[in-house]
Image (spheres, grey):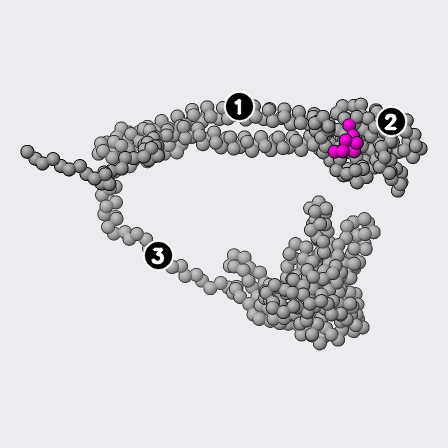
């Protein structure tokens, strides 16, 4: 008799699969049909699209209703203020009571009131946030012109405050409280309508995707059966090629593959013995006719940008901003050309002008300062003309720096430009942001030029700290030109075209 085999120790026994591992194995063995996947994808995409559309529609509807409510409330408050002006000035409280009663008796108005200039309520009817203690201020004069409020009964409302004026005299305030219930009901109705439309569209999309998925999966299943037969060494049944779509092309390709499978496999085996995995190719480029690079020069650069341009751009339409920029920035090339400068580029509301490149100019520092003075005077003349016709005006801040920089063609072979770069250019750009509107700020390097000191008046400004520099940078503010400089400036200005100002 054979000896009984001893039982394996518990540590050597294979561990029983846990419930999570069994669930993962079962999920991996599941096959999700293409039709269901397609339906799920279409449903997800349609849900996301309809949810986004619903949010946009509801928000748009709410904005429209809010705007309508705001216009209505503002109009009612303004109407009450206009009607209450004469009774307020005359002290006719009875007439004010009649006005308040008439204004507060129409839906959706919850209340109307008239306050005197001292903040005392003279007449009113219905809800009043300044009596109920729900207003953001103790008196209408200190409250915003429109704010939301909830009545003691819990009703949502919007309060509109309009001043009652007679010429420059503030006679009081008119207060109109408008119910938000119609607006909220309209928004809720829009939400219900949109949700119903979303549900209908999703149901239709799901049904259509299921039908389309089944029609799509049928030829794929035939392809799968044929590939299994081909893998088992059996010649599969020829697939129909009547479809005029990608699946039809796939079936035709599969039929061709089945006909020549043995030959292709042989070719593949032989081919795999001769072809290396990859071959690196090195492309030698020809030398470009325009060479990228530049040369070191000592030149001057001027930056001129509009002070407060961000707020101006927010207050004006884009067309007006573009027209304003075109009108003012057109003065920069004229001022630069008068002293041999070149406009390097326009960067938004800023003009960058270089002096001494590409043509050498031994007096480039003074020419840059004189061009800045000329440019500001042209800007002032243009601003006076615009102010006379009621158009908005601007003021520029100008900075000039002198020093070594690289001048040449920079960029790429596809796009290049002639420009100057270097620390001197960066310093000029930073100095343009520290000056006062209408002023010209010079660096120590520019002010140290003999041609500048001899023909320019300036006062020493406060040193500024610039990122990347260990020591503060000395600055000078131009106060004017000396007689010789003014003579050169007058000569240059006379040479300008009349439309330059």
Q: Position of residue 51 (x, y in %)?
A: 55, 31
Q: CA distance from mark 2 to mark 1?
A: 54 Å
The residue nearer to you, when weighing 431 against 472, is: 472
Image: magenta residue range: 127-134
**Viewer can see residue 333:** no
The residue that appears at 72% across and 32% down in the rendered structure is 149
Farthest residue in the left direction?
1
Instruction: Give residue 458's quadrant in the image.
Output: bottom right
Q: Nearer the viewer, mark 3 or mark 2?
A: 2
Q: Is residue 478 left or right of residue 121?
A: left
Q: Nearer the viewer, mark 1 or mark 3?
A: 1
Is the residue marked by circle 3 packed among few (<14), some (14-19), or many (20+) residues within 10 Å?
A: few
Q: Position of residue 144 (x, y in %)?
A: 76, 39
**Viewer can see residue 247:** yes
Instruction: Give residue 76's quadrant in the image.
Output: top right
| Callout 3–callout 2 Cβ contact below 8 Å | no
Location of the C terminus by quadrant is: bottom right
The residue nearer to you, when weighing 408 against 131, is: 131
Q: Position of residue 445 (x, y in %)?
A: 67, 72
Q: Is residue 329 left or right of residue 482?
A: left
Residue topped by disc 1? 200
Q: Position of residue 486 (x, y in %)?
A: 79, 70
The residue that appears at 41% across and 61% down in the rendered structure is 284
First-in-chain label (3 vs 2):
2
Residue topped by disc 2? 97
First-in-chain label (1 vs 3):
1
Residue topped by disc 3? 280
Q: CA distance from mark 3 to mark 2?
A: 94 Å
- Say whether residue 129 is magenta: yes
Q: Secondary structure at mark 3?
A: loop
245 to 343, vertically: above or below: above
8 to 483, vertically: above or below: above
């Amino acid at each position: 008799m054979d000896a009984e085999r001893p039982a394996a120790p518990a540590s050597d026994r294979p561990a029983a699969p846990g419930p999570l591992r069994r669930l993962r194995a079962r999920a991996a063995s599941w096959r999700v049909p293409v039709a269901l996947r397609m339906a799920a994808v279409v449903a997800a995409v349609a849900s996301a699209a309809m949810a986004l559309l619903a949010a946009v529609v509801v928000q748009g509807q709410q904005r429209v209703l809010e705007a309508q409510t705001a216009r209505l409330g503002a109009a009612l408050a303004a109407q009450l203020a206009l009607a209450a002006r004469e009774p307020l000035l005359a002290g006719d409280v009875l007439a004010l009571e009649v006005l308040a009663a008439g204004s507060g008796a129409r839906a959706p108005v919850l209340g109307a009131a008239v306050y005197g200039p001292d903040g005392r309520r003279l007449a009113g009817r219905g809800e009043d946030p300044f009596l109920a203690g729900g207003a953001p201020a103790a008196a209408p004069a200190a409250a915003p012109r429109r704010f939301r409020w909830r009545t003691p009964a819990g009703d949502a409302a919007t309060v509109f405050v309009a001043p009652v004026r007679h010429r420059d005299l503030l006679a009081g305030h008119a207060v109109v409280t408008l119910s938000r219930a119609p607006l909220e009901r309209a928004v809720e109705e829009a939400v219900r309508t949109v949700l119903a439309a979303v549900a209908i569209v999703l149901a239709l999309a799901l049904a259509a995707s299921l039908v389309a998925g089944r029609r799509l999966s049928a030829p794929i299943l035939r392809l799968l059966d044929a590939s299994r037969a081909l893998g088992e060494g059996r010649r599969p049944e020829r697939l129909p090629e009547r479809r005029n779509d990608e699946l039809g092309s796939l079936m035709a390709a599969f039929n061709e593959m089945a006909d020549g499978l043995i030959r292709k496999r042989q070719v593949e085996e032989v081919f795999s013995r001769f072809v290396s995995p990859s071959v690196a190719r090195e492309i030698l480029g020809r030398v470009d006719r325009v060479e990228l690079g530049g040369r070191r020069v000592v030149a001057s650069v001027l930056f001129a940008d509009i002070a407060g341009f961000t707020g101006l751009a927010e207050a004006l339409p884009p067309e007006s901003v573009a027209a304003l920029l075109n009108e003012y920035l057109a003065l920069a090339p004229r001022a630069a050309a008068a002293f041999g400068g070149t406009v390097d580029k326009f960067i938004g509301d800023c003009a960058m002008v270089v002096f001494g490149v590409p043509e050498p100019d031994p007096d480039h520092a003074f020419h840059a300062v004189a061009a800045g003075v000329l440019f500001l005077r042209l800007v002032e003349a243009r601003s006076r003309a615009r102010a006379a016709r009621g158009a908005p005006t601007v003021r520029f801040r100008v900075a000039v720096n002198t020093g070594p920089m690289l001048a040449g063609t920079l960029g790429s072979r596809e796009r290049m430009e002639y420009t100057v770069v270097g620390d001197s250019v960066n310093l000029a750009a930073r100095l343009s942001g520290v000056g006062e509107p209408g002023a010209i700020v010079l660096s120590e390097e520019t002010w140290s030029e003999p041609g500048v000191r001899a023909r320019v008046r300036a006062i020493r400004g406060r040193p500024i700290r610039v990122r990347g520099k260990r020591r503060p940078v000395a600055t000078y503010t131009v106060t004017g030109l000396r007689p010789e400089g003014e003579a050169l400036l007058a000569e240059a200005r006379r040479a300008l075209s009349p439309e330059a100002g």
